[in-house]
Image: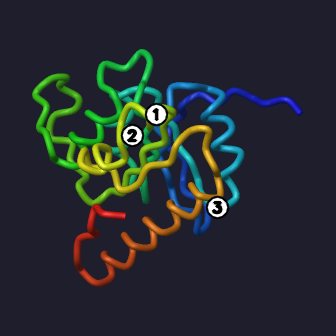
Amino acid sequence: MTLQRLAPEAPRPSTGDKKLILYVEDDDSSWEIAELALRERFELRRAANARQVFEIVAREHFSAILMDIELAGSDLDGITITRQLKGRIDLSEPAYARNAHKPDLPIIFVSAYTARYTPSSLLEAGGDDVIPKPVNFRALTAALTKLTLKAATSLLQGTRPSSKP
């Protein structure tokens, strides 16, 4: 089987009832594996750096974000991006990150650095869940399903979802 490298692309219309998920991942192999493993249940978009995250989130509506922590070639790491999106910090620089707040958007940290960052510190930064790498895709699918259902229920009830898992 040959894997094809997929680059970030222009927005596409959402297909069917699949939830649209943004995966913030700088590693091509990790992206390809996740896209292959999750595509039956979710529609994935990719951002490889902070600029792409803020630009994509500004133009598309996502059900959740999968956030890597260490992003090679990005001026912000996944924790800082999450804090900005959740409104826990307000960055004046870089300019593209200003006023980018999505406090209700569920974020799951997906990282190989779970020994360096405790789950509680990642939740405190604004994450809603933590999945270690190598990824158990059954656990990730369950976490995504739980968070997207919780967010949808909160919207129907007119309340904000809690950021606790």
Whether residue 130 is visible here, answered yes or no, is yes
Q: Earlier in the sequence, mark 3 or mark 2?
A: 3
Query: Could you tell me if the residues under marks 3 and 1 are in contact, i.e. CB atoms within 8 Å?
Result: no
**Nearest to N terminus: mark 1 or mark 2:** 1
- Left or right: 55, with 28 as reference point: left
Please name which of the two marks, 3 or 2, marks the residue nearer to the observer: 3
CA distance for labels 1 and 2: 8 Å
Tell me the quarter of the picture where residue 70 sits.
Answer: top left
User: Which numbered marker is on residue 47?
Assistant: 1
**Outermost residue toward the top in this view:** 73
Q: Secondary structure at mark 3?
A: loop
The span from disc 3 to disc 2 (Cα, nearest Å) is 21 Å
- Looking at the rendered structure, the secondary structure element under dot 2 is helix
Query: Quadrant location of the N terminus?
Result: top right
Name, please, the residue furthest toward the bottom.
Answer: 157
Q: Nearer the viewer, residue 106 or 10?
A: 106
Density class for disc 1 (Cα within 10 Å; few <14, some 14-19, many ≥20) is: many
Q: Amino acid at mark 1?
A: Ala
Percent across and percent down for residue 57 are: 35, 44
Residue under pointer 3 = 41
Closest to the observer, 71 or 56: 71
Q: Inspect the image, locate mark 2, and give the three-letter code of the amino acid beneath it.
A: Ile
Which residue sits at x=30%, y=63%? 164
For the C terminus, the image quarter is: bottom left
**Neighbourhood count class around disc 2 (C-alpha, 10 Å): few under 14, some 14–19, many 20 upward:** many
Q: Badge 2 is on which residue?
A: 56
Q: Secondary structure at mark 1?
A: strand
